[in-house]
Image: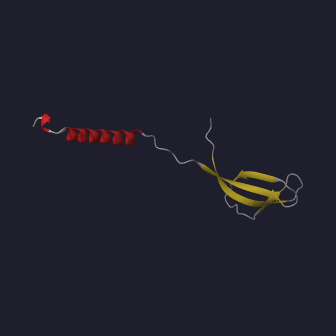
């Protein structure tokens, strides 16, 4: 079968189909897979007597409302006010 037997529209459609398949395959395999951002848990401690606030890494057993130690400013009780996750910033 001679290629001149096909009409121009059919040749264009075959060419576009081949181009589209090649494009989709290369874009699928060559794109870099994105890693989900790393998250870390943060615990916020507040003093019951003064306005002192401290952020630290989450420790196993932390919960909101738990009393944890003394305030470094006034020696009052420190209370866990919040626990949340933060997205770690990439190191540059």
Q: Identify whether 12 is placed above or below 47.
A: above
Which corner quadrant of the image does residue 48 belong to? bottom right
Residue sitting at the far right: 74
Which residue is located at x 25 percent, y 38 percent?
15
Side (left or right) of 14 relative to 50: left
Q: For the point 12% across and 37% down, which residue is it? A: 5
Q: Position of residue 20 (x, y in %)?
A: 32, 41
- The residue closer to the viewer here, 12 or 75, is 12
- The quarter of the picture where the N terminus appears is top left
Q: Quadrant of the C terminus?
A: top right
Does residue 82 appear left or right of residue 53 in this picture?
left
Is 65 in front, or is 20?
Answer: 20
**Residue 69: x percent and y percent?**
81, 58
For residue 90, what is the image quadrant? top right
Q: Is residue 6 left or right of residue 57?
A: left
Residue 17 percent location from the top left of the image: 27, 42
Left or right for 21, reference 92? left
In the image, residue 27 lies at what x, y percent? 39, 40
């Amino acid at each position: 079968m001679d290629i001149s037997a096909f009409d121009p529209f059919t040749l264009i459609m075959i060419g576009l189909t081949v181009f589209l398949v090649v494009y989709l395959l290369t874009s699928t395999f060559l794109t870099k897979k994105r890693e989900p951002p790393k998250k870390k848990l943060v615990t916020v401690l507040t003093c019951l007597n003064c306005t002192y606030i401290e952020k630290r890494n989450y420790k196993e057993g932390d919960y909101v409302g738990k009393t944890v130690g003394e305030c470094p400013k006034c020696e009052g009780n420190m209370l866990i006010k919040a626990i949340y996750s933060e997205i770690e910033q990439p190191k540059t």
